[in-house]
Image (spheres, rainbow, N blue to C red):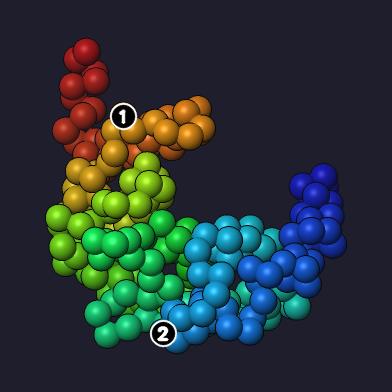
């Protein structure tokens, strides 16, 4: 049908061939492929591309695309440190970490797990969310603009993992993420940012639906 044809055109077009022309997808010295997260091109570009590329690879069952996807996924899984953190790490002058690129990479790992059921993803996410839970609350999700207004992306992955594992410690992390939401700071593209922030509120409402649903019914 038309949807499959659209994906095939993307595969044969820019998405499927971006690695041949994009500096961000160069494997040499790429921070996303380095076990210590060191190197170049370590911000949002690789996970943004991989999120769509991997989905197409699995849906189309394209052997070459799946092989390419595995290189990046394994690079990420192999980059986890003893404290649970992974991949490239960006700090501001106060030493506060920017979690935004990792929020995007978590989507890629979810897609991979739903395809391959690889248990490494479960262990990986458990350790990373524990790292976030134990991160200094005075610095968590602070100091970097995009992670502040896109906390809903982080919350999405925690909810996904909670639904998968039922780990009660994740509820505390969900609360912490929600508490750090930068309400009202609408710099840049106001329409986009407003929608991103609005999305987080409804995610949090879903998480606390036992509290909200009676109030909404009686409103």
Locate residue 179, reporting x and y percent: 20, 43
- Nearest to N terminus: mark 2 or mark 1: 2
The answer to whether 149 appears left or right of 182 in the picture is: right
Q: Give 147 or 206, whichever is nearer the viewer.
A: 147
What residue would you read off at disc 1?
A: 184
Please provide percent x and percent y for residue 57: 69, 67
Q: Residue at x 35, y 39 (%)?
A: 200
Q: How many marks?
A: 2
SS for callout 1: loop
Which residue is at a point 51% across and 32% down the rendered structure image? 189
- Specify the quadrant that holds the C terminus: top left
Give the spatial CA distance, label 2 vs label 1: 36 Å
The answer to whether residue 119 shows anywhere in this view is no
Outermost residue on the front side: it is 93
Name which residue lies at 32% across and 74% down.
Answer: 85
Residue with the mark numbered 2 = 36
Hey, which quadrant is residue 158 in on the image?
bottom left
Residue at 24% x, 61% y is 94
Pointer 2: residues within 10 angstroms few (<14), some, or many (20+)? some
**How busy is the neighbourhood of tag 1: few (under 14 within 10 Å), some, or many (20 plus)?**
few
The image's mark for residue 174 is none
């Amino acid at each position: 049908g038309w949807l499959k044809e659209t994906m095939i055109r993307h595969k044969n077009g820019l998405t499927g061939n971006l690695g041949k022309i994009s500096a961000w997808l160069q494997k040499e010295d790429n921070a996303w492929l380095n076990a210590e997260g060191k190197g170049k091109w370590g911000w949002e570009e690789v996970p943004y591309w991989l999120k769509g590329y991997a989905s197409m690879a699995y849906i189309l069952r394209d052997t070459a695309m799946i092989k390419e996807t595995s290189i990046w996924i394994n690079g990420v899984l192999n980059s986890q440190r003893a404290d649970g953190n992974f991949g490239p790490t960006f700090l501001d002058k106060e030493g506060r970490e920017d979690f935004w690129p990792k929020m995007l990479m978590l989507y890629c790992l979810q897609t991979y797990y739903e395809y391959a059921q690889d248990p490494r993803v479960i262990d990986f996410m458990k350790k990373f969310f524990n790292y976030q839970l134990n991160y200094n609350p005075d610095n968590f999700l602070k100091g970097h603009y995009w992670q502040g207004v896109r906390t809903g992306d982080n919350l999405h992955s925690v909810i996904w993992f909670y639904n998968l594992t039922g780990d009660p410690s994740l509820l505390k992390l969900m609360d912490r993420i929600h508490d750090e939401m930068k309400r009202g700071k609408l710099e840049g593209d106001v329409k986009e940012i407003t929608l991103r922030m609005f999305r987080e509120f409804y995610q949090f409402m879903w998480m606390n639906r036992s509290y909200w649903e009676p109030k909404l019914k009686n409103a």
